[in-house]
Image (cartoon, rainbow, N blue to C red):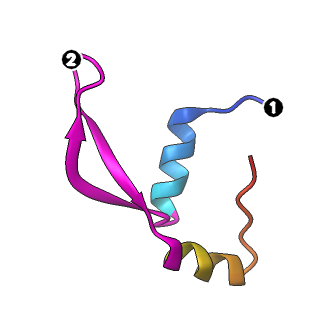
Amino acid sequence: MHFDRGNFSKKMLHFNILTPLDETVRPTPKREARLYRFNKESYDDLKQKGFRLEF
């Protein structure tokens, strides 16, 4: 199975599992990367509804 990084982040943001922070990092000179925090409460709510996060 191929892991699509762009699609993964979109899905995690859609499910509100990631909360954006006010911090960024500069991995390349062209663009800053936004940092996120894992939202365990939201994940636990989804898990009770049958959501499964597998890699």
| Residue name at image x 20 percent, y 48 percent | 23
Q: Residues within 10 Å of mark 1 (few under 14, many from 20)?
A: few
- Vertical relation: 29 (above or below) 15: above
| Residue 37 is one of the magenta-drawn residues | yes
- Mark 2 vs mark 1: which is more N-terminal? 1
| Residue name at image x 61 percent, y 79 percent | 44
Q: Residues within 10 Å of mark 2 (few under 14, many from 20)?
A: few
- Vertical relation: 9 (above or below) 18: above
Using residue 36 as the reference point, say whether residue 16 is left or right of it: right
Quadrant in the rendering for residue 21 = bottom left
Using residue 39 as the reference point, say whether residue 30 is left or right of it: left
Q: Which mark is residue 1?
A: 1
Q: How many marks?
A: 2
Work out how far the residue at label 2 is from the one at label 1, CA to CA, in angstroms.
Answer: 30 Å
Where does the magenta region start and end? Answer: 15-41
Residue 49 position within the rendered picture, expressed as x and y whole percent measured from the top left: 70, 82
* Residue type indicated by callout 2: Lys
Q: Which mark is residue 30?
A: 2
- Vertical relation: 25 (above or below) 23: above
Q: State the SS at label 2.
A: loop
Residue 50 position within the rendered picture, expressed as x and y whole percent measured from the top left: 76, 76
| Residue 22 is one of the magenta-drawn residues | yes
Pointers 2 and 1 in contact (CB under 8 A)?
no
| Residue name at image x 20 percent, y 15 percent | 29
